[in-house]
């Protein structure tokens, strides 16, 4: 029991290290709320919304400050309720956590 939880913690740490370098340039400029949002994004959104590698397809649209016309209320509602193809997170995250995710999305430049 104890051993398996230690190794799953190790696996999570290794996953975090594998993902973290991608964001180091942005991290230096994020405030605490945006950083929380980044962490939650990595946990719950990246799997669908960020292209895992050059050769693999991306499941869901790229997110940025321009998603849903940059409307905070619309973003919050979307993350809470999800869609036919996306799970909602209102039972998974507290409102302040969803706000943090939205704050993080607002730091992402809009694609050209
Ligand atoms: C299981 C995959 C999956 C996960 C996990 C997921 N999404 Fe999505 N999301 C989608 C898909 C697919 C769409 C496109 C809408 C559709 O087709 O229903 C979408 C659409 C969106 C949109 C609207 C984008 C637009 O331009 O219309 C937002 C905002 C969004 N997701 C935010 C998030 C956030 C924030 C998280 C994490 C808390 C998240 N999603 C987790 C699959 C996912």
Image (spheres, grey):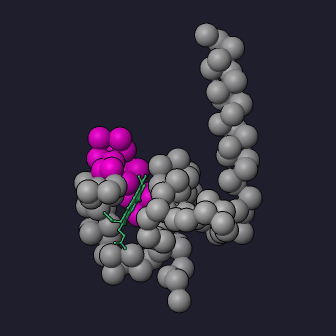
Tell me where residue 29 sits by quadrant: bottom right
- Residue 96 coordinates in the image, percent (x, y): 37, 51
- Residue 80 coordinates in the image, percent (x, y): 29, 53
Q: Is residue 26 above or below residue 101?
A: below
| Picture quarter with ligand 1 | bottom left
| Side of 98 relative to 111 (left or right) | left
- Residue 66 coordinates in the image, percent (x, y): 41, 80
Residue 11 lies in the magenta stretch: no
Nearer to us in this view, 91 or 57: 57
Q: Name the residue at 52% across, 83% down.
A: 111
What is the residue that sits farthest to the top in this orientation?
1
Please say whether residue 27 is visible from this viewpoint. no
Q: Name the residue at 45% across, 76% down.
A: 65
| Side of 37 relative to 2 (left or right) | left
Q: Name the residue at 65% across, 12% down.
A: 2
- Residue 78 coordinates in the image, percent (x, y): 29, 62
Q: Quadrant of the N terminus?
A: top right
Number of labelled discs? 0
What is the residue that sits farthest to the bottom in this orientation?
112
Q: Name the residue at 44% across, 64% down.
A: 60
Nearer to us in this view, 59 or 30: 59
- What segment carries the magenta color? 87-104
Please say whether residue 48 is visible from this viewpoint. yes
| Side of 60 relative to 76 (left or right) | right
Tell me where residue 74 sits by quadrant: bottom left
Residue 94 lies in the magenta stretch: yes
């Amino acid at each position: 029991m104890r051993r398996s939880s230690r190794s799953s913690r190790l696996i999570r740490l290794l996953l975090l290290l594998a993902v973290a370098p991608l964001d180091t340039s942005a991290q230096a400029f994020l405030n605490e709320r945006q950083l929380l949002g980044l962490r939650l994004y990595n946990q719950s959104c990246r799997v669908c919304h960020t292209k895992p590698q050059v050769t693999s397809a991306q499941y869901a649209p790229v997110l940025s400050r321009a998603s849903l016309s940059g409307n905070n209320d619309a973003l919050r509602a979307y993350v809470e309720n999800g869609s036919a193809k996306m799970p909602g997170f209102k039972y998974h995250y507290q409102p302040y956590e969803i706000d943090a995710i939205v704050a993080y999305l607002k730091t992402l430049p809009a694609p050209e």
